[in-house]
Image (cartoon, rainbow, N blue to C red):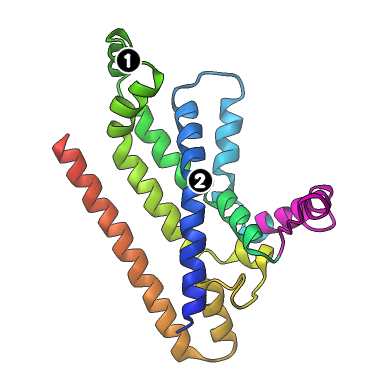
Amino acid sequence: MDWTALVLSLKLAAATLVVLLPIGLALARWLAWGRFAGKAWIEAAVVLPLVLPPTVLGYYLLVGVGGGSPIGRWLHETLGVQLTFSFSGLLLASIVFNLPFMVQPVQRAFEAIPRELTEAAAVSGLGFWQTLARVELPLAWPGILSAMVLTFVHTMGEFGVVLMVGGSIPGQTQTIAIAIYDRVQAFDFASADRMALLLLVLSLTAVAASFLASARLVRRR
């Protein structure tokens, strides 16, 4: 069992969730209730990571933020930040690739909230932030919970994009999914079996728990 790769994957999943949650909430609410030209194109861009091969997305990230790109050179020369073959690059790739997993469930949850409730809250004197905290977020919570679990679990199992952007540097960019691949390439099937089983159990448990929690919330409502 490669515990270093597991810890790195857990760290990446947690960091992705922390960064992506506020971004996903804001974007999902805007797409759910906004009416503007070009909305379909923005929604398509959000969903694009689901239909693009991970290697294609990873390639464009390498081209866009790699050391040879203007952005990559500026970040390295100005801030000393390298986004390729580093944890920062893994985090960026994970945020981009997981965007639809965060946004879509939350967007559907916001769309299911009757507009009469938010209008009633406004008439009652509640401001934007009070309405968001007391009315919208509690009603959208099952969708938010599902999005959080999907994002976390998907980050744990992602392979193609993180391999393209981060490579397979032990202790730095080698996640558990990449470690499984490396073990198989080395014909170490016993280690690959243990890590794959652990990842399977963690993913199944997390998804099942989110479904149970969401069902309970819906029944209470």
Q: Mark 1 — residue?
A: 126
Instruction: Determine the secondary structure under disc 2.
Output: helix
Crowd band around label 2 with a 10 angstrom C-alpha radius: few (<14), some (14–19), many (20+): many
- Residue 137 badge: none
Front residue of 8/69: it is 8
Above or below 9: residue 185: below
Q: x and y percent of residue 202 in the render?
A: 35, 68
- Do the residues bearing badges 2 and 1 touch, measured as CB atoms within 8 Å? no
- Queried whether the magenta region covers residue 72, the answer comes back as yes
Above or below 40: residue 59: below
Residue type highlighted by circle 1: Leu
Q: Is residue 28 left or right of residue 207?
A: right
Q: CA distance from mark 2 to mark 1?
A: 27 Å
- Queried whether the magenta region covers residue 173, the answer comes back as no
Residue at image position (61%, 24%) is 38
The quarter of the picture where residue 116 lies is top left
Instruction: Determine the secondary structure under disc 1.
Output: loop
Please identify the quadrant where the N terminus is shown. Answer: bottom left
Above or below 160: residue 152: above
Q: Mark 2 — residue?
A: 20
Please, which residue is most extreme toward the front here?
79
Q: Which residues are magenta?
A: 57-84
Choose mark 2 or mark 1, whichever is in front: 1
